[in-house]
Amino acid sequence: MTSLKLKTNITSLNGEITIPGDKSISHRSVMFGSIAHGETKVSNFLPGEDCLSTISCFRKLGVTIEESDGQLRIIGKGFEGLIEPTEVLDVGNSGTTIRLLMGILAGRPFFSSLVGDESIGKRPMTRVTNPLSELGARIDGRKNGSFTPISIRGGELKPVNYQLPVASAQVKSALILAGLQADGQSVIIEPEETRDHTERMIIKFGGEIHKDNQQIIVKGGQKLTGTTIHVPGDISSAAFFLVAGAIIPGSEVVLKNVGLNPTRTGIIEVMQKMGADLKIVQDEESSFEPIGDLIIKTSNLKGTVVEGDLIPKLIDEIPIIALLATQAEGTTIIKDAEELKVKETNRIDTVVHELKKLGAKIEATDDGMIIHGKSPLNGGTVSSHGDHRIGMMLAIAALLCEEKTELDNPEAISVSYPNFFDHLNSLIN
Ligand code: SPQ
């Protein structure tokens, strides 16, 4: 494991960054390109390790995928074109890859086995394996199908009629992907609206899906056709620079090409509520995924409450929102966010533990955290715990630290933002 000396005591951030491709949409572009018929071309694909794991799994399933410089060419032959893999499918650190892939493999008449890294080995899989087994797939795994390694023998599927117990786009998407292969119409109901990139992909690939509030209806046996996809920049990556620009004095940062899908823009709502000087310049409305530029300036922030149906719209931004709250006047309460416990790390524990080391006044609760601002940050040795979002949050926190600060295991960041430090350094004057 390596350690990286972080930049500290930064007086201002200025400049412009083009935010790299969205991780969730990059994964789905490979998956849908693989199950559609014909050629799919993808531009601005995110070459992060998680998305490269998705490419590697689909190549093992017999799909031709050419990749160069953020451009992909995928030759899909429909669901039926996928072949039994001769090797284990390794998803690395990626929860999205394994859970959505299970939905696809549940309907394929062959055997496959799925593994991932140590963190994936701790993340719950029954939320997907249970409903998929009910539809007819034979799935097993360590601890009664709860954890990787997972084995799947897919086959004919009954339609889904399922009320999700947790608000999870991964579970919803796995069931939609299984539903596309089922014999009949499936109905999936989510407790709160989650990111809808899978639904938008179906439409983009010429399919049909209906949404009525939190109820999603999808027909089995649809033929999807290859298309052209431009992946918008990832708002979850932009979030680190939104917060950096707001908390570092004398800053003005322009973030170009940011995906502004309303199921993902919770961070913007929260920052606006906290008083951030944030301007949105939205591009012309696109029917696929909305995109725009964000301009953030140093802001006077006040504490807030983050809760309820806003949580799924900013779930991955909570670590960086916690840092933002340390620099806001008053108290910020984050609740209804138990799902943080089953991410790459238990993000309630890792955020609280690491920010405390730097001197933040933050406490963990059962379903979130309480942060008291505004507190100076001192510095010290911190760790990503192998979690990309914790690593990036700490690198932004260090900018405010008065003393030397080192980050253990910075490599984790390459999962979603391989050129994060190049972008950060380009803003430091
Ligand atoms: O793919 P993975 O490892 O689960 O990645 C994370 C992340 O921080 O990048 C979560 F740890 O994002 C998930 C997100 O939390 C990506 C995702 C998706 O693309 O569908 C949905 C969310 O997970 P969930 O469990 O709420 O469905």
Image (cartoon, grey):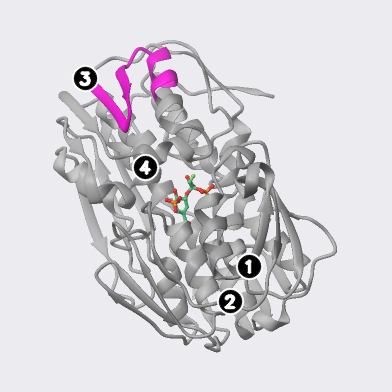
The x and y percentages for residue 99 are 56, 57
Disc 1: which residue = 137
- Report the disc number at residue 374: 3
- For residue 47, which quarter of the picture? bottom right
Residue 412 seen in the current view:
yes
Residue 230 sits above or below residue 221 on the image: above
Disc 4 to disc 2, how far (Cα)?
A: 36 Å
Disc 2 to disc 1, how far (Cα)?
A: 7 Å
N-terminal of the two: label 3 or label 1?
Answer: 1
SS under mark 3: loop
N-terminal of the two: label 4 or label 1?
Answer: 1
- Report the disc number at residue 157: 2
Label 4 CA crowd tier, 10 Å (few <14, some 14–19, many 20+): many
- Pick whichever, 171 or 297, lies toward us: 171
Amino acid type, residue under disc 3 in the picture: Lys
Q: Looking at the rendering, in which quadrant would you find the C terminus? A: top left
Disc 4 to disc 1, how far (Cα)?
A: 34 Å
- Pick whichever, 330 or 403, lies toward us: 330
Amino acid type, residue under disc 2 in the picture: Leu
Label 1 CA crowd tier, 10 Å (few <14, some 14–19, many 20+): many
The x and y percentages for residue 69 are 64, 62
How many labels sit on residues? 4
Foreground mark, 4 or 3, reads 4
SS under mark 2: loop
SS under mark 1: loop
Label 2 CA crowd tier, 10 Å (few <14, some 14–19, many 20+): many
